[in-house]
Amino acid sequence: MSVATRASGGEAVAAWARVESAACARRLSAMVAILDVRQSADDSASREQWYLDNWGAVCAEIGAAQQITSAAASNQLLVATSLRDRLPRVAAAFSQGQLSYQLVSTAVWRTALIKDADALRAVDADLADALTDWPPMSKERTVDAIDVFVDRHDPHALRRTQTRARSRGVDIDVDDASGIATLWGELFAHDAKALGRRLDGLADTVCGRDPRTLDQRRADALGALATGADRLTCLCDDPDCAAAAPVRSSAVVYVITRDDTLTDQGDVTARQDAALDGEQPRMFDKPVRELTLAEALTDTDPGELAATAPGVMIDGPVLAGPIIRRLALTAAIKHVLHPGTAPPEPRYVPSMALADFVRCRDLTCRFPGCDEPATACDLDHTIPYPVGPTCASNLKCLCRKHHLLKTFWSGQGGWHDRQDPDGAVIWTVPDGQTYRTCPGSSVLFPELCAPTAPVAASITRMTPHATAPGSGLTMPRRGTSRARARAHRIDDERRLNETDPQCQPAGAAPPF
């Protein structure tokens, strides 16, 4: 680090990159150390087939420490354990700052199918010698170069691209800034033809005065198809139009907004709504070649400031007011009320009104770094019921994985949580560190985070099963341990390679 501090220019960039890589290697080593402690604890073997096993609990801990999801933490932990147990020479170069995390993680993935110890040692030695001298390469060329060493020592361990048909799929990329998503997919040609005809049919269910272009109607038709609608709602504003009646969706998408976003009828709002449809307006009012420089640099369409507040889709982006008002044409509107200082409800399962409030307040799982949407979460009593009441100050959203973590690992690893009246949750992890998570609505809808009635634990309602979290319950179990399942996947992929003529090593007997 002292060298990096004294350096300047490009030399400083390179020096700090080495420091960053060495620090990353130490961070991964710390993750493995936590796993070792967990797996060496009493009864750790009995927890290997828990749904939330030792590995899962460690991923939750390191995910909380880095404010990342448990899935991202699991990927890092897999790289960390593979470097220590399978590629020690690559790990040594990484710890000296000679390799980047991206490079070593690629090496871990591409060598994952090697089972023979001698072959693995040989590949590790070749990679350690070569990786530090390789020039900068694209991801594809890096993969190809690593595969050369794998193919040299264990051809059946190559990870191969499947056929084009097996790679079909659909990707949806949501733009958080615009409220628009990009859809890209590959599907069978006959299905694509049928989809195109279906979209054309739905696009033609409006009258000729609808302001949308054909492309816009086809895009909206795809949304209608997704929600189970058999036609589009016409936007011609003619009360006598037969196609103007709203089409109610059979799908459920939760969007939170304010009343004035839906009720504002001002001129600016009307112009914003109209701007969603029709042809793209011309940027200039005459041909570009006839513009002066001053005219070309003048913004002829500056737009207007947002007339109403935006909203947010649970498990989705922030949506502008015009998009929310368009959604409201086919949506059921439900008001969410802040419970204020209302007394606790006299039951374990909260009422629909209270459950809706908690989900809208939290938006996501309240575990540090988790982004599971509130609609897919359990409602957890921070102080277990019946000692803890059923009220907003004692309820929060937890995904099933982190709900199980709290319930079954509180006694094993020291997980504890407490909740403030404004919905903030303070977590204490096994090593004593604390992490505070605030409700997801605190930025856009801070009124939902106004304090509710404080929690008062009821000693008189304490029962034997309430004295210990998880008492009387059992952790759901896996059919097989995580390590065994991973080994089965490796064996399956190797068997496919062994039967593929293209995967036979050089000099092998011909298949005839």
Image (spheres, rainbow, N blue to C red):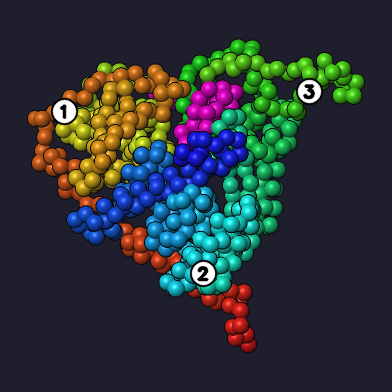
Q: Residues within 10 Å of mark 1 (few under 14, many from 20)?
A: some
Vertical relation: 193 (above or below) 431:
below
Q: Residues within 10 Å of mark 3 (few under 14, many from 20)?
A: few
Q: Which residue is mark 1?
A: 457
Disc 2 marks which amino acid? Ala
Q: Which residue is mark 3?
A: 283
Disc 1 marks which amino acid? Ala
What's the CA distance linking mark 3 and mark 1? Answer: 64 Å
Task: Tell which of 230 and 129 is nearer to you.
Answer: 129
User: Residues at badges 1 and 2 in contact (C-beta under 8 Å)?
Assistant: no
Indicate the quadrant containing the C terminus: top left, top right, bottom left or bottom right.
Answer: bottom right
Task: Tell which of 474 and 99 is nearer to you.
Answer: 99
The residue sitting at the right extreme is 290
What's the CA distance linking mark 3 and mark 2? Answer: 56 Å
Magenta stretch bounds: 310-336
Q: Secondary structure at mark 2?
A: helix
Image point (59%, 67%), residue name: 148
Q: Quadrant of residue 438?
A: top left
Can residue 168 be seen at all in this image of the molecule? no
Where is residue 206? Give x, y as percent. Answer: 68, 33
Q: Which mark is residue 157?
A: 2
Disc 3 marks which amino acid? Met
Q: Residues within 10 Å of mark 2 (few under 14, many from 20)?
A: many
Left or right for 498, reference 350:
right
Left or right for 26, reference 298:
left
Q: Secondary structure at mark 1?
A: loop
